[in-house]
Image (cartoon, grey):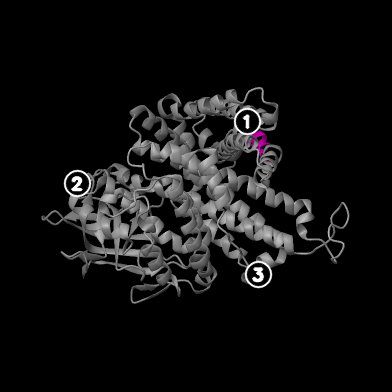
Amino acid sequence: MTTYTAPLRDMRFVLHELFDAPTKLTALPGMEDASADVMDAVLDECAKLCEEVLFPLNQTGDQVGCTIKDGAVTTPPGFKEAYAQYAAGGWCGLTASPEFGGQGLPETLDCLVAEMIGSANLSLGLYPGLTQGTILALSALGTPEQKKTYLPKLIGGTWQGTMCLTESHAGSDLGLLRTKAVPNGDGSYSVTGTKIFISAGEHDMVENIVHLVLARLPDAPEGSRGISMFLVPKFFPKADGSPGERNAVAAGSIEHKMGMKASVTCVMNFDGAKGWLVGEAHKGLAGMFVMMNKERLFVGGQGLSQAEVAYQSAAAYAKDRLQGRAATGPARPDKPADPIIVHPDIRNRLMFARSIIEAERALTVWTHMNVDIAHHHADKAARQQADDMVGLMTPIVKAAGTGFGSEITNACLQAFGGHGYIREHGMEQLVRDVRITEIYEGTNTIQALDLVGRKLGIEGGRLFKGWVARVNDDLKRVEGRNDLADFSGPVKDAVKRLADCTEWLNEESKRDPNAKGAAANEYLRLFALTVFAWIWLLTAEKAIANKSGDGFYAAKLDVGRYFMKRVLPQTLSLDAIVRSGSTAMMALAEAAF
């Protein structure tokens, strides 16, 4: 069976020791209440909810799945009740504005809450997780009336939101979408079209669902510049805020998926459904990205969440499962065999998992701290610098979090041997569930292309240069310290390798239009591993500074040294692959495939 205990010790280390988040965040306007005690209390309560309520439903939710009858979707047994408990605890509005009933706490805290919820029950956590993006989009772009009508319900958790982008012929290329919105003459629009892959499009856990739909106005220009965003509720709100008449929107069917079976994915039909414009006409794609950028960070955390529960489950199994003897002699001579954790292959899998997970968690927290700074800091230059780091790291958090999440989950299943393949142990569910995270909210290749094709080129590389300058400042601070030589030397080399590779790629793309597309995925992994190395340098600095006898800090150094010796060297081969160019992959004639 899978096992999960919220990793509160590591979360608190990252928050309080590595980044001193409470001190930095409470200094921001509007964040004064985000004290260390408040943040710790929130993490404690979330851990209880996840361990005691959400996690016990995870495997049964997968086995039962969602069902549809006459357009109505039923979630697995226990999900409705568990979500009601979640909503009643105020979790839906953790970071939302107090003006509309939210708690106004930092995104930095919310990313750790979301990780725990994802580890405990990835499917259930997706329902309110998507609503966070709806809240953000309406908060930024909605009219005063839209905010007043919808935000309190969404924040309170009695309503939920969706993102309706994809159509059968238009996946990542949203400029091809055909859904139409025709003015009704009274400020509303009639929205007609079919959207696919709509998470939480229809279900029984809330009394109303608010769809944010991308569609075209009659005078819309071609392509992505002709997209507008519309708010289309399942039920029209009455004057007292309760659901009223049903709108002309319904689930035509639900998808039968390889994973996340307890999270419903719908085909949604809009048959002249009444909706209202959100933001400016023909600016819907930019508006939707207000939502999508948050969700991309959220999905990166989902990948991390599955890696965490997979690691915990594999580590527990490896300590218990007896098989063979240690190469150095019997470790448990009183037993017929040794636990498999004595074997180098198992150790390697577990150490790899942990070295990535702990670096990813820290990077996710650091990125969300920059989200909070970008939103709240009083100084414009500080806000811009933080926003630069969020822009640069978002594709890395999403793609590396989910790519490594899938890789780690598969590696941890392998530790179970044949039992990993058997349904009752729960590991195969984690492998199936995590796989979607590499695809939705922009595939990982889309993230890689965003990184190499857009983020690296902004104002002559301002974002990349800003991050490199930050790392070089850290390297200068620890220069000459022998106790950090195992970390600072490899980081210095890796950052130079990344900078040189980046310069080469930018120059090569001037000659070869396919250069960036050919290199994008490997470049992103190269970048991610270099960022993780920087995180491990900062971590080692804090661990060495702590003089307590707590084994936690010694373990940090051991895991960090493993990363430097066994994982970071991948950047050598990744650099070589990037520099190999596009010729080899583009040479084969299309007819030969």
Q: Name the residue under label 2.
A: 219
| Residue 491 badge | 1
Q: Which of marks 2 and 3 is nearer the N terminus?
A: 2
What residue is shown at x 66% (from left), y 46% (from top)? Answer: 550
> Type of residue at label 1?
Val
Question: Secondary structure beneath disc 2?
Answer: loop
Quarter of the rendering occupied by the N terminus: bottom right
- The answer to whether residue 238 is visible is yes
Q: Residue 167: image x %, image y %?
A: 36, 56
On the rendered structure, is 40 left or right of 359?
left
Residue 575 magenta: yes
Q: Residue 261: image x %, image y %?
A: 49, 67
**Rounded to the nearest whole Å, what is the CA distance between mark 3 and mark 1?**
41 Å
Q: How many labels does the image show?
A: 3
Sort mark 1 into few (<14), some (14-19) or many (20+) by Cα contacts within 10 Å: many
Sort mark 2 into few (<14), some (14-19) or many (20+) by Cα contacts within 10 Å: few
Q: Mark 3 points at which residue?
A: 422
**Rounded to the nearest whole Å, what is the CA distance between mark 2 and mark 3?**
56 Å
**Rounded to the nearest whole Å, what is the CA distance between mark 2 and mark 1?**
53 Å
Which stretch did the figure color magenta?
A: 567-576
The one nearer the camera, 266 or 261, is: 261
On the rendered structure, is 413 left or right of 28?
right
Question: Secondary structure beneath disc 3?
Answer: loop
> Type of residue at label 2?
Asp
